[in-house]
Image (cartoon, rainbow, N blue to C red):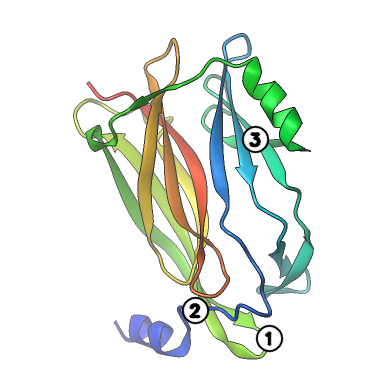
Amino acid sequence: MRTSISFLTTTSATAPLARIPGLPHTLDVLGFDREHRTIYFAESVGAARIPVLAPDAPDSFVAGPASASTIVHVMHVDGEHAGRMIVASSQHGRDVDAIRARLSPLDELESDAYLLTTRVIQRRALRVPGSSPIRKFTLALSVEPIVGDGDPRFGRAVVTAYLRAKASLDRVWLVPGTDLVLARVTYLGVPSDVGHDKQVAVLTQRAA
């Protein structure tokens, strides 16, 4: 309890906007490649300069290079890397549209049949130049069907959140031709001002 109180009283739940410009990140589900059994995503990060950890100070960050307008991710539903989001490339909008055109769409499901649990694995104070340290959390996310047995290979992700350790289940889709669903989780992943949203995809078992 003493450690928790000390952490809350010596760190801030807001970050300086002027020094660390940032924008919300949105994760768009492009579709499913049936031949290669992969799901494609487009992460839109705007034109802000995204903070990155300083190489010589792991508890501090500096302004990184200007981000690409869109980052394409893929996720395999089979094999050793099933359920992991992997960066494929940076693309312009017209290229993303071309990728979407050759993929099968995912049908949206009701999210009420699934439960998101969040656990703080680690919390640290992140130093910010000219300001109080801000809160940094490593969160373990778990998405499981409320009714039915979950597959231990799926349903979990670990993310880095800032300022507040909170996450919410956004939307859920059925992966075509499988008993798997794709859940999109939103959390505070951009440390600017009062915090901006970032999203991650979690593959889990379909509810019974």
Q: Would residue 89 be seen by someone viewing this image from the given angle? A: no
Type of amino acid at the residue the image marks with label 3: His
Q: Is residue 177 left or right of residue 53?
A: left
- Pointer 2: what residue? 14
CA separation, marks 2 and 1?
14 Å
- Pointer 3: what residue? 73
Q: Residue furthest right?
A: 65
Q: Residue at x 40, y 89 (%)?
A: 9
Q: Residue at x 70, y 43 (%)?
A: 70
- Residue 178 placement: quadrant: top left
Q: Would residue 187 be seen by someone viewing this image from the given angle? A: yes
Determine whether label 2 and label 1 are within 8 Å by CB: no
CA separation, marks 1 and 3?
32 Å
Type of amino acid at the residue the image marks with label 1: Pro
CA separation, marks 2 and 3?
29 Å
- Residue 107 placement: quadrant: top left
Q: Secondary structure at mark 1?
A: loop
Classify 10 Å Cα crowding around label 3: few (below 14), some (14-19), many (20 and above): many
- Between 6 and 112, the one nearer to me in the picture: 112
Classify 10 Å Cα crowding around label 1: few (below 14), some (14-19), many (20 and above): few
Percent position (x, y) of residue 89?
76, 36
Q: Which dot, 2 or 1, sits closer to the camera?
A: 2
- Residue 174 placement: quadrant: top left
